[in-house]
Amino acid sequence: MKFNRIYGLFLRHFFLITRSFPRILDLIYWPSIQITLWGFISNFFASHSTYYNNAVGVILTCAILYDFLFRTSIGFNMLFLEEIWSRNFTNLFIAPIKIGEIIISLVFTALIRALIGLIPAILLTSPLFGISLLDLGIYLFFLFLNLYMFGITLGILVSSGLLRFGPSFENIAWSTMFLLAPFGCIYYPVEILPDFFQKIAYSLPLVYIFEEARNILINSSVNFENIMNAFYLNSIYLVVSISLFYYSFAKARKKGTLINIGE
């Protein structure tokens, strides 16, 4: 056993981590996000123990909505990552396929993947817990539409990062939703956040979606302003994400890195 061999392998992995911003970010923010998210949840239930009359119903409903968002986003990323893992980019761009056609195909395929996972979860909540997501009524469609738009937006943004940074950006693809979870106010109202975090939260569609879901379940009323605010923000972010994807693709093609993207 030679120390210089061990040291050499250590240096290899050390430089691999320290020279890659996505890897450093992945190491730092996982513990931070977990502590932050569960800290806010604990604070909320400690000081507002009687806030929910039907705590199980509200929490499970929000959990299902969040799961749909997560599966939409990660489903889009998985489809894109499969092209990277199989080194299929060369085949894609030899064929007469446009970037817009690739994005649209991934958008609809991600929806199918999300629904396959969502429908059994919805069916299980009724016999097991006596809860039906249909209690949200027709407004459930608008909530799902906004969640779908935001999930696709995140998927496109992460795919842009994969084009720009390559497979080293893969960890971000898995953890984007957890990064935004504390600001999405999934299980607690936005008022529980510090003032600075509230400003960040209101810039995201998530806070309006989940605030409205709780409003419908708890108060049996509908605030269309929340739904429209979420839709406006989603539309802006979606346009920005698509523009960034085209930009990242153009840069990758100019540098000749498309062919080399892969495991």
Image (cartoon, helix red, strand yellow):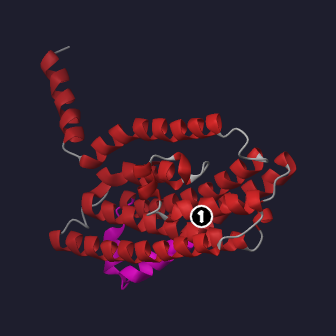
- In the rendered structure, the answer to whether residue 7 lies left or right of residue 53 reads left
Quadrant of the frame with the N terminus? top left
- In the rendered structure, the answer to whether residue 63 lies left or right of residue 72 reads right
Residue 14 higher or lower than 226, as above or below: above
Q: Residues within 10 Å of mark 1 (few under 14, many from 20)?
A: many
- Kindly report the secondary structure that dominates the magenta region of the rendered protein: helix
Q: Residue at x 31, y 79 (%)?
A: 94
> How far from the left and from the top, in percent, is residue 31?
42, 35
Residue 141 is one of the magenta-drawn residues: no
Question: From this viewpoint, which residue is outermost toward the top?
Answer: 1
Residue 38 higher or lower than 193, as above or below: above
The residue closer to the viewer here, 244 or 183, is: 183
Question: From this viewpoint, which residue is outermost toward the left?
Answer: 4
Q: Residue at x 48, y 52 (%)?
A: 183
The residue closer to the viewer here, 53 or 21, is: 53
> How far from the left and from the top, in percent, is residue 223?
66, 70
Residue 72 seen from this side = no
Residue 89 is one of the magenta-drawn residues: yes
* Residue 99, quarter of picture: bottom left
- In the rendered structure, the answer to whether residue 38 lies left or right of residue 87 reads right
Residue 129 higher or lower than 220, as above or below: above
Q: Residue at x 55, y 56 (%)?
A: 70
> How far from the left and from the top, in percent, is residue 19?
18, 44
Question: From this viewpoint, which residue is outermost toward the bottom?
Answer: 96
* Residue 25, quarter of picture: top left
- In the rendered structure, the answer to whether residue 261 lies left or right of residue 73 reads left
Q: Residue at x 75, y 60 (%)?
A: 219
* Residue 207, quarter of picture: bottom right
Q: Amino acid at mark 1?
A: Ile
First to last magenta residue range: 86-109
Q: Which residue is mark 1?
A: 209
> How far from the left and from the top, in percent, is residue 101?
43, 82
